[in-house]
Every structure is written in C-alpha cells, then in structure tokens.
Image (spheres, rainbow, N blue to C red):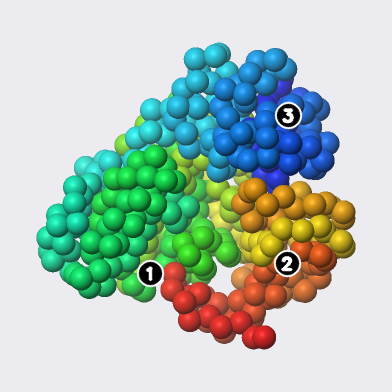
Amino acid sequence: MFTKILIANRGEIAIRIIRACKEMGISTVAVYSQADKDSLHTALADQAVCVGGPKAEESYLNAQRIISAALATGAQAIHPGYGFLSENPDFAAQCRQYGLTFIGPPAEVIAKMGDKEAARRLMRESGVPTTPGTDVLASPEEALAAAKTLGYPVLIKASAGGGGKGIRQVDRPEDMERAFLTASSEAEKAFGDGRVYMERYLNPVKHIEVQLLADQTGRTVCLGERECSIQRNNQKLIEESPSPGVSPAVREKLIEAAAKAAKAAGYVNAGTVEFLMDQKGNFYFMEMNTRLQVEHPVTELVTGVDIVKWQIRIAAGVPLDFDQNDIHLQGAAIECRINATNAGKVEFFHPPGGPWVRFDTFLFQGYEIPPYYDSMLGKLIVYSSTRGEAIRKMQSALCELIIGGAGNNIEDQIEIIRDRQFRAGEYYTDFMKFFRPKK
C-alpha cells in the first residue's frame, strides 16, 4: 500500500480524497495555485506545494509541475480526482514514466475510451447497444448525407468531447453547416481535437449511468445505477440512486452491458458507463467516464462501498474482496450540486446537519471564491430508507443551507425538488427546458 499520495486537484474533491487517505493511514500532498493558497484542501493535507499561477493551465493543468511536486515530496502515487488532468492519457503515461502510480485506468484505456467515436465503435463490436449514428464526419456535406439517413433531429458531437462541449442539435438541413462548423470549432478549442460525429437525437430519454470497479485480476463489479437527467446545458444539477425509472429487470441488463463495456476496454479502477434510456426501457451506450464522478457519493450511500478508498486499493494492486452478488441497493440517495452564480466573498456560511445529511464543500466563512475555476461550490447529499423520505430530507437540508455574500442556485434547487414531475420520478433530460422557477 502507498504511504504518500499527491492529490492533483482542488476544492471539495481534493478534500474528499484527503479524508479517505487519512482514514487509510496514508500521508497526503496537496498542490495549489496562487489563487488557492488559502484554500481548505491546502490546510488539511500533510504537505502543500504551489504549482503555479491562478489560471488552470498555469497550475492544475501543468502536468510537469505536478509530477515534479510528487517526486520532490516523495509521493508514490497521484490521484487526479475529476476534471483537470483526470482523463488525460498523456499525464497518466508521464506518471508511469517517472515511476509514479496514476490512480485511475491505464493511459491506453483512457485514450481508447476518450475518443467517443472510437469507443462507440468498440461497444458496437462488443454487443453493447449504441445510439444510431456515424463514424467521424469529414465535412458538413457528409453530415447532411448522414442526417438524411438517420432522420432529423440529430446531434453533432465532439469525438474527444466531454462536459457538454462540442455538441449541437440540428433540426433542419439548412442548419447543418453552421452547427457542424460551430461544434468542430468548439471541440478544437476545448480538447485540441475538432473531429465530430453524429447521433440520432433521442427524446424523451433519461440519462442513466452505471458505476463500476474493476481490479487488476480482471474482476469487475457494478455498483448499480445513477439517475442524472436533471441537466442544464448538458451539465448535471441533481443525481440520485437508484433511478426511479429503472426496473429491476432493466437494472440487470444495464449492469450486464456496463460490465461487458468494461471488459471490452480492458478497464481497471473506478469508471462509469453512461447510457440514454427511452420510455420503454431501451438503453444505448453514450460514453465511458474513465475517472471518479462528481456524483459518486449517492452510489456510496446506497451500496456502502467507499469508491475513493477502492480506487486507491486497486491502484496498489489489492483485489476486490466482493463480487456482483454482494451488491444490493438499499434506500435512496439524492445529490444537489450547489453552484456559484458569481464570484465573491462568503460573508456567512451555515451547512445543514442531521442524520444522513452530507455537504461536501471547500467553503468557510470569509473565503473568497476565485473566478478561475468550475462554478461548483459543493454537493449536498442526503440518504433515507425511501425516495419520498430522501426528497423531504433534501428539501429541508436545502432550506437550511446558507451561503451568504455569494450568489448561488440554492433556491432553484429547492424549486426543482418541490416540482411534481421530479417527485413522481417522471422526468427526462429536457426537464430544465420547461422548468420555470418561482420568483
């Protein structure tokens, strides 16, 4: 087992990993930007190293400085968290080159599954259902011909995409050229890769994902599904497990498909297979996230499995000590992402409390929110024996949460939780398109 791990991230996920390491008796090294010198993760780690200026490319995306910090402090492994370098195959390969363990899948697997179009092709060949679509498209003209076969509406999607970037919906032939060029340009700027492909636009659908762990012996265990259909601009807002729209029979098929996907990819460590599911329970592979997910806590609460600790154990060569028959989803968990609507100073901070209420955050009273990074301030997670009780617990917790001085989306989350459609579990990825919060 490792004795020292460097966490190549910031904010709540860095704190989450530090806490797991402390419980395992592992020393931690935090890296931070100049903007984060007073951030909570730097105080909680055993050591902290500044790796550059306030912008992400100067610090959290600077692979060489992060590796240098790991070597200088004697860390044996690097945990990338999510975002930043977590799905960068070059970074994973550099870690290996310098004798550092990357806590995640091998670089080759990250590269294979990071190419969305190539991943779709692999899934088709492996018998995993995929959304009707194309390979990489060379031009708007080729896209027009493909859309004629698939039928409108269609989605133009970045091959190297993620985080909702490089995606454009096309409803009419006359909009194709503009959508193609815009998606390609956005993908080039975001990922350094302007290649795009096309999928048929399915609606209404649910966004369902399956969390899995795979060890170095080849054992793969799926930890049930998460419902992630409440989204704005392709960014998730609320996640829950289990999904209110997945029956036991469909869950069994999802788990089978996710395990098949992981084995086809030669997957090791924690990963998530994402699917779109229609109203009849038919589902289609969308992509695989080769990292820890923001929403992993809801799975931890309904399964009792600490995903972060198992990431570390698997990276150290420890085999899973349970199998698929040991996984039983119990109760219901819901997570609300609390996002900033503007940067500012936290004048007053009161997190909610009570049994099975958890607020993963890096905030404290007096903290100055920097303008350089992701807008998420924290994740409010609740657990109860039934979904109805979990909804009531979340509503109560949201009403108790106060982040004074910094604009946020707490009120919007309260309105979503109160919404009749949400409470019935009969919601789809277009929910936010029709949602109108009360003023």
Which quarter of the figure is the C terminus placed in?
bottom right
- The reply, left or right, for residue 115 in relation to residue 90 is left
Q: Which residue is mark 2?
A: 407
Q: Quadrant of residue 276?
A: bottom left
Taking depth in this image into account, of 346 and 419 the one nearest to the observer is 346
Mark 3 element type:
strand
Which label lies toward us, 2 or 1?
Answer: 2
Percent of width and height locating residue 259: 39, 43
Q: Name the kind of residue labelled 2 in the image.
A: Gly
Q: Earlier in the sequence, mark 2 or mark 1?
A: 1
Residue at the image position 51 percent from the left and 67 percent from the top: 232
Are the residues at dot 2 and dot 1 in contact (C-beta closer than 8 Å)?
Answer: no
Percent of width and height locating residue 64: 57, 22
Residue at the image position 44 percent from the left and 56 percent from the top: 164
Q: CA distance from mark 2 to mark 1?
A: 31 Å
Mark 1 element type:
loop
Q: Is residue 21 visible?
A: no
Q: Is residue 116 above or below residue 319?
A: below
- The reply, left or right, for residue 205 in relation to residue 331 is left
Q: Which residue is mark 3?
A: 50
Q: CA distance from mark 3 to mark 2?
A: 28 Å
